[in-house]
Image: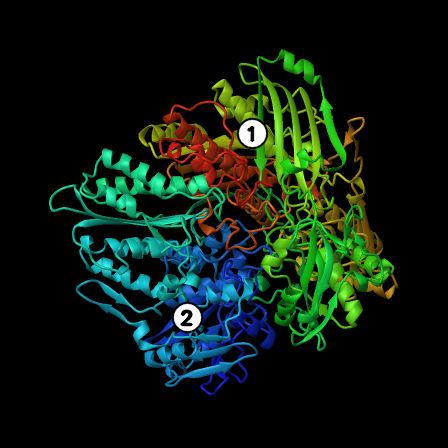
Amino acid sequence: MLHYFFIASIANQTFSIINSVQITEKNAEPEITLLTYLRRSLGLTGTKLGCAEGGCGACTVMVSKYHPHQNRIIHHAVNACLAPLCSLHHCAVTTVDGIGSVASKLHPVQERIAKAHGSQCGFCTPGIVMSMYALLRNNPRPSMHEIQEAFQGNLCRCTGYRPILEGYRTFTKVKEQLSKACYNNNNNNKYNIEKLYDQSDLSKQPQRELRFVGERVLWIQPYSLKELLELKATYPNAKLVVGNTEVGIEMKFKNLLYPVILAPAYIPELNIIQHTQDGIQVGASVTLTLLGDVLRAAVKKLPAHQTEVFEAVLEQLRWFAGQQIRNVAAVGGNIMTASPISDLNPVFMAAGCKLTVMSKGYFSAFKQSPRKEDDIAIVTCGMNVLFKEKSNIVQSIRISYGGMAPVTVLATATCNRLLNRQWNEELLEQACTSLAEEMSLSPSAPGGMVTYRRTLTISLFYKFFLTVQHLATFSVHYVFADCLTLFLCFQAVPPGHNNDDVVGHPIMHLSALKHATGEAIYCDDIPYYENELHLALVTSIKAHALIKSIDTSDALAVPGVVAFISAKDIPGSNLTGPVVYDETVFADDKVTCVGHIVGAIVADTQAHAQRAAKDVKISYEELQPVIVTIQDAIANKSFYQPVRSIERGDVAQGFKDSDHILHGISYLINCPNANNVMCLPQALVAKALGVPANRVVCRVKRMGGGFGGKESRSTILSTVVAVAAHTVKQPVRCMLDRDEDMLVTGGRHPFFGHYKVGYMNNGRVMALDVMLYSNAGNSLDLSLSRALFHMDNSYNIPNIHGTGYMCKTNLPSNSAFRGFGGPQGMMIAESWMSDVALSCGLPAEEVRRMNMYKEGDFTPFNQRLDQFTIDRCWEECMQLSDFNKCKEALEQYNRQHRWTKRGLSIIPTKFGISFTAVFLNQAGALVHVYSDGSVLLTHGGTEMRQGLHTKMVQVASKTLGIPCSKIHITETSTNTVPNTSPTAASASSDLNGMAIYNACQTLLQRLQPYKDKNLKGCWEDWVKAAYFHRVNLSANGFYKTPDLGYDFDTNSGRPFNYFSYGVAVSEVEIDCLTGSHKNLHTSIVMDVGKSLNPALDIGQVEGGFMQGLGLFTLEELRYSPDGYLYTRGPGMYKIPSFGDIPIELKVSLLRDTPNEKAIFSSKAVGEPPLFLAASVFYAIKDAIIAARAESGLTGPFRLDSPATPERIRNGCEDKFTKLCPPADPGTFTPWAVQV
């Protein structure tokens, strides 16, 4: 059934069609979004809430409406989290729930993403499905370029994107035949365009003003321009809203209230598109998508010299937000918001504030942002020059910048200086000097990156300068790649393999189809209880302060508010914490970070609770010191205990024996991290309530949309909600918005490494002394990370000493995140390895290969390396990537190009598998066999994207010798398997798989007598016979990893059961003028033992790599010096998008490497691949080395992680960077600090 809905023309009633059902909403609330209405009023939970700011695409739906000026129905993908309910009058809305279901019939869009393994956690999948569905409604046979463009507004944290694109490649023209061959299921390969609505319903547009009166807001939709002007005169402070992409953000995140909203979307004069002799007139309500369509048509039709402005606007539109935003955002809204980082205003300003067709000039527009797709700009500009007839003398010039002042600015002084000058090198030099003076910024300017932004103003002008010279001689044609080049190598199923044995087969994720239809249930999809209440957190705005008073009077006066919950309401203990009880459920008398939970509001709706939470007034007495950064902690000696060290060999003698010694430092910035441990919330909730743990049951079906995995931090919310429910004696629900989640839960530990390394002339490393500092935050949490165990990465250092410090700071507590200190330790190892290669003047790959471990070597913690395969991974990866040929081509490219450079790097990884806390290396399972032969399986692991349940069903299937279809997993719960270990450390398949194997073996022993009596019988016969003989058909399984345990004092024992290995080669291209980079190629060879499921393992390799790509090149939490977090959602915090995938990606699983220490000879795969993305970082560094060589700079240099465009550009020192020197440290207060 398809859903769509209308909003009736009666006051306060909306008539819409939702999934083919006509709906009249009699009390349309202007503050309610389409997403809230779908989920809460209609119970359509397939559409997900990901960020509430239109930045992730999880809430994507298709909106169809009649456009009177185009005289047709248009279909657009839209962010339901921003679309006001009142704006959808006489619109049809199609959601993922409406296009297909597992129970009835799947739409091919749903089927193909599932069968291509394009879904892991599945939370983002419905939004991706709907973006593709909307594209196909408009274009049944799109190109790959059009598909990638449709996904610019969608994010996925798990898959790495490649399988999504591969699945949807089958819809393109070139893959039509493959589509029919590979996806033929009940004739679904030919998708029918179903009728969603009666067109006459949508074309009945309101002929009079519409009004919707809400609790706080009046929404008015005028029909004519005259009505709009009269209303604006009556309500001068009213906001005009078309797409709600700006006002919606202001009302939700900036706590602004606009009592009157005017919606001019249907006013004819504001939707006009008129071609004139001077150009094109565009109405203010015209959407950016429609503007783009019109301009593209004009570019095709008009001569090139008349369309330079149009092409500049199109180039900016190409990277303007995501497709969903462009589909609703209006031209007038973009101008009137007057954003300092507007993408279009600099273009409009440089063009003379209107789109005009010019005859004898050159026009260009540039945008520089951290990420190319769907990202806000750092600096934008529009540049326009007109020359005197038949000369290169400047007649007029306009240079406009965004991102250099509170509003878009013209470089007036510079423009005046360039008038009547020849367009040559002398003009360039004067322009650069003038721009450096005119485009100045305070070193404390909001947004930070001051040196970079100033340099960009010059670099972008230089690009324009070259463009003009270039265009004067010949035209430039841009060619876009139509598809990615992809290569996957699965492990072959051995000859003679029993087809009934599903282990080793690429079985689809068991929940993939439900992910694609939106039928997979997540926590907030659980139906409401009749008397359910909602909770919103009240958090500290100070990093270190005493609480003097809390005034809740205004908050309690908000309609629907039931109670304010604080420390005084806790019946048990306010002390909490995953390892030691050094935290509180609610701050009592003191707060120690911004975001510290002080209390909570409980109300009848989430909106009322969140509004009231903002009305709670807390008075503080600030305390000193405020420790935010690692350097602050070092200066104040603020460390948690214990301080750990590992040492092997004679470090002092090693330095004496070395030819050279170098010192260096390396920073790794943190990124945010769903809970994956069951027993911890159970124990801490019981402690807070003062009851035994057996009175608390924790259940989880699946997790998704967590933006990453944080092992323990969900307990800060579960305890609060439990106390609230206990206090009000009603069910309480809390779903944190993305900004709240990122504020209170911390992330991966930032690291600072200081190293001293001794090495020989040939690059052999003889000694290393490294100090590792991690920013733990305001509690210990899980901060005893494995960084020291990975300080060597894959290199045999004969004399090594490492010390690890956990810094106590006034930031939200950081926690275990994919790799848990391992990637940080290895990254610092690669930093000094890179420095050694640079110092020796040797190829980095030779120095790395020379220092690598060999079979039988011992690690710094004295564990012998058995079944060591990294050398095989290295050689296969060199061959797979054709490394030597790539290097030759790269060197030739760099000789021929000054302002773009390419870099190449090969990086190994060695990752230890086991919990370093020995007691956690245990698992339980419970297996029920029912009398009909069906099996119910439960284990201690949680499903959080990795396909753990799928693998466990495969293990049970192989062990019991029955098809997977007979086995089912319902959920993970503490009342079926107690005392579970976290689903972490990449050990879940190993531990839970062995526990399931143990339980299944017990059942097989019980069934064996009945099998012996009836050899020709089947599984059902044996089960039924055992049942009638009163045999127990339920079994517990248990497993603990043997021979584990490490002692720091004696540096002895085995911290790990085994190691996973992998190698990656990456090639990148950087823009030396802007710092942007392209990921050209990556080859990965990964040792996963004998894979349980190659499809899932490949997915983990790709997903881990892409998450690592974000860690090392994009993602950066930015804090003020006072500990305030600026980056609280996808608007400012950027994870990799579809456009960040390497253009050529090859992934191969190492063959013939059985691992005797894990279930069915497999190996862990969750965390090890993440570090392989460091190959991209060091390829970028290699490219920067080539750029620095052009300026005569050689030798080691510092490049902190992530390698953002700012750091890349600043690393490529040249004549332009010298014009913008940074301010001296200590002479100003920076906007943001490196924590």
Q: Residue at x 53, y 70 (%)?
A: 257
In the foreground, 291 or 1061: 291
- Label located before the other in sequence (2 or 1): 2
Q: Residue at x 77, y 27 (%)?
A: 1051
Q: Quadrant of residue 933?
A: bottom right
Name above or below for residue 1099 compared with residue 82: above
Q: Position of residue 681 (x, y in %)?
A: 76, 56
Q: Which residue is mark 2?
A: 242
Q: Position of residue 1057 (x, y in %)?
A: 73, 36
In the foreground, 822 or 1205: 1205
- Residue 1080 seen: no
Nearer to us of marks 2 and 1 is 2
Q: Position of residue 712 (x, y in %)?
A: 72, 51
- The structure's colour scheme is rainbow
Q: Position of residue 844 (x, y in %)?
A: 50, 25
Q: Amino acid at mark 1?
A: Ser
Classify residue 463 as left or right of residue 844: left
Q: Amino acid at mark 2?
A: Val
Q: Which residue is mark 1?
A: 831
Name above or below for residue 305 compared with residue 729: above
Classify residue 230 as left or right of residue 990: left
Q: Residue at x 64, y 28 (%)?
A: 792
Contact (CB < 8 A) between labels 2 and 1?
no
